[in-house]
Amino acid sequence: MIYNQAPFDVIVCGAGHAGCEAALAAARMGASTLLLTGNIDTIAQMSCNPAIGGQAKGQMVREIDALGGEMGINTDVTAIQFRLLNESKGPAVQSPRAQCDKKAYQFRLKHTLELQPNLQVFQATVTGLIFSGQKVTGVRTNLDIEFHGLTVVVTTGTFLRGLMHIGQNKNEGGRLGDFSAKTLSTSFLEAGIELRRLKTGTPPRLLGRTLDFSKMEEQRGDASPTRFAFYDSRDPEDLFHVEQTGEQRIGWAPGVNQVSCWMTHTTADTGQLVRDNLHKSAMYSGEIEGVGPRYCPSIEDKFVRFADKPRHLLFLEPEGRSTNEYYVNGLSTSLPFDIQIQMVHSVPGLEHAQLLRPAYAVEYDFAPPTQLFASLESKKVENLFFAGQINGTSGYEEAASQGLIAGVNAVNKVRNQPPLVIGRHEGYIGVLIDDLVTKGTNEPYRMFTSRAEYRLLFNHGSAELRLLHHARAHGLVSSTRLTRMEESKRQTEHWIGFLEGTKAPAGQGTFGDAIRRAITGTNSTHVLPALPTEFLSQPEALRQEVMYRVSHQGYLSREQRQIDKLSEIEKIKIPPHIDFLQVRGLRKESALKLAEMRPYTLGQASRISGVNPADISILMILIEAGRGGGGKPPAA
Amino acid sequence: MDLIHARSERALAAANQQLRGSLGRHLGELTEGLLLVLARIEAYIDFPDEDLPAEDRRIVLAELEAVLRGTARLLATHHYGELLRDGIKTVIIGEPNAGKSSLLNRLVGHDRALVSAEPGTTRDFIEERIILGPHCLRLIDTAGLNPAPAALEKLGMDKTLERAAEADLFLWVLDASLPCPVLPAAVVARLTPANTLVLLNKVDLLTQPPSPALPVPELLALPVSTLTGDGISELSDHVVRLADAFRQDQGSEIIAINARHADALRRANECLESARVKVAANGPTELLASDLRGALNALGEIAGKIDNERMLDHLFKTFCIGK
């Protein structure tokens, strides 16, 4: 049957971290939205470790929050442990991280979806896309129900021809206990979309009461939690909580009653077990064709590649308040189950551990993301958007970021509005998507702070200031929140000006000078002068941001200068109808590359490998000439 | 060696092309070295929860200093590059009427400078490029260094002193029939046996061999006559000998960076120096990384943008990352 005659504006396939953000963003922009998921009970499931944030990822979650997304606030109200990483280093590289109650996280997000106006959630497995020419017009499901939509956002995670490996044992599925989306791949291939294979893995889960924590080292949360959402600007109704509702919520705040993680390590016996049984590992016996990540190696990889390292650190992470299940961070493997049991038992504190779930590796299809525009729309099929692991990424935060952008841009497409494209100089989300669509990836792509050229500008506290103009332009936050965000930006600028323009006591120049000498100077004898009380009475988040901007002014302006130098070509948009192969003067190799990649701006073009500065000059002249001549580029 | 014989723009460009190979290789080595240093720093920024070995800034310092030596070496080739492209700056100095312009004309092989018996005829500079053996020389004729100059001459003399300050080689022309004149101290200070030849001119007017009292006694003095051409061929041999030394400083491989390269390398150097101070003072990690990334950006301006993936390759090879 056909479910709807009037098409939805946006159909989102998949309700993981990407799908949830995509659906919420679209519905919040006022678009009629349908979210399809194979299983409503696994909405927003953390398939791997029960944690959000960490290096670069924590900053991304704050960016998601600045753009009206849900991940930050959902983490805050369901987290059971908060830690600020790199606290001893500077603000730019400090990252919030939280252990979440896995089930609470899912329940709250599911309820958020249920309460969201303009959004309908339905349980069905998408089996294929419906095309009209080179456009997508809807989806087909396993119940033989067709849904029509003006745009479709695909967020398949690891489910696309998902194949799980435990030693020689193979099971179809995207996650233990779940199904595999097999026929959807055929739809993509028919549309001319290339697919490749990636691999990822997850460690075993253990029963807490069988563990001996006295042999492990405790890792506690921070006494004063660093949250992900911007509470100074958020509307009160955003803070809704499933478990603590109404009266119950009085006196409750994120970060109370935190739970600990526990550290232990592998032993010589673990290493011996791995080495003796390497041939039985799916990864090492050639069973797996997909490429795994370098930064998240299996325990087999660690013992093989770093043979001289006697032991490896393991973290026991609780999966929630109302469960006794523990995640063994660091013990990802595709060795057979019997070896897994022996391996676990070789670890101090885990001698008698009972396994609740085995470790496994999973292989899945992804669509190399260079097949996408910067809007995340497919270059091959109009109105089709991709987000999350199908684009070759790894991580909940990376997925959620793309989901948000894809959801917003699906609506922009329906409304014939320009897409939301975040610059590499504006935030990690910009770096992520630009890397994906320009360079592609050969392994599951994870964000690192080092991937950002302008890392010092991307401190987590400044996400709202950096992305405010996008939130405003695309209507991503409520008008009341927008007003507060704008006020916060004004206040930040005001107090920077105040400190830079006010003389400090005892001839130390301005307060700005004194702060720089004390905080970023190389002479450690300088101490911070007492700051004016009118500044000290400002909210903490504001003060921190102002102090950071002032103390690191020299370094921040060095990055800003670099941005300004490159900004000209970043702003020049390449007309979509340009025929690179007909442009005189372009080298053949560059023209072919450009025709394939179809970059959005000259800046993006300049980052394509093989395109050189001379090619960019030629394009710049061509585009400028086209603009002067009334919009159409000259026939080349 | 083609570059030295390059007479036309096109030949020069072709020669430059050949240089690009070895320059590229050296830059590549520097870049790899720097990426490794950066990887050691970045690991502690991006993977704070990992079981990394204690941060050892001594290794970082040693590696950083090696990179710094490399950039300094490359920067040093900038001057040699100028010598190759523009010729070895050879300044002819001496008193008015000692025969400087005549010498220039002799070396060039035709009358280029206006010559007269009246002292102080050359007030502006005359430049000629000549090929001497394997070298290209930029001969610069100067106004005479008169111990008691007239106002107009004074102007010319100041310019001469400026030229002398940046000269690679000096040809000091003396009138052998007169006592050795007094040169300005700033000029004398620059004269060494390695960069100066004293030419005792007008030997055709003498009956006895000249023996002037030179301010720097070790300088080699050659009798010549710009009028008859006697001694000019010996002079040429000696100039070639001195010019050879510039090339020997360079080692067997020829690299010559241009002004744009030198500018980028200088900025890279500044960033590296700043990084070195931070390593020594145990400064903030992410700011140290910022300096190193600044240096990489500068190197990237010469050889093309450096992909962060290359740093990550080093990082994941050096450290066991991943939980």
Image: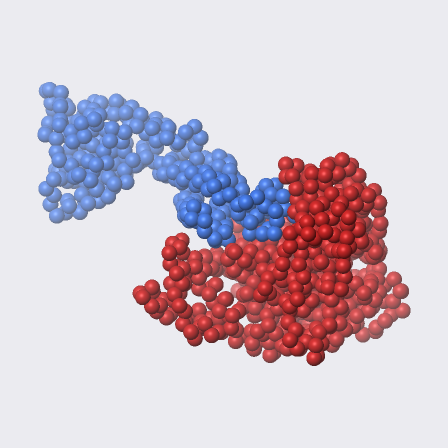
Chain colours: A red, B blue
The quarter of the displayed image where residue A269 is located: top right
Q: Nearer the viewer, residue A347 or B42?
A: A347
Quarter of the figure with the C terminus of chain A: bottom right
Judge from the rendering whether residue B206 lies leftward or rightward of residue B26; answer left or right: left
**Residue at 61% in and 49% down:** B50
Q: Is residue B305 visible?
A: yes
| Residue at 31% over, 66% down | A506
Report the number of discs.
Answer: 0
- Residue A150 quadrant: bottom right
The answer to whether residue B271 of the structure is visible from this angle is no
Q: Is residue A187 above or below residue B317?
A: below
Q: In the shown orientation, is residue A514 left or right of residue A200?
A: left
Asked if A482 appears above or below B277 in the picture, the reply is: below
Q: Which residue is at the front of the view, B147 or A425?
A: A425
Furthest-front residue in view? A214
Residue B153: quarter of image? top left
Residue situated in front as seen by the camera: A182 or A244? A244
Image coords of residue B166 (percent x, y):
28, 40
The answer to whether A222 appears left or right of A328 in the picture is left
Residue A616 percent across, percent down from the top left: 54, 53
Which residue: 84% across, 45% down? A169
Q: Looking at the picture, how far across and down is residue B188, in whole percent?
A: 19, 36
Give the percent coordinates (x, y) of residue A528: 40, 63
Q: Residue at x 37, y 30 (%)?
A: B249
Q: Relative to B27, say whether A414 is above or below.
A: below
Q: Quadrant of the N terminus of chain A?
A: bottom right
* A180 lies left or right of B111: right
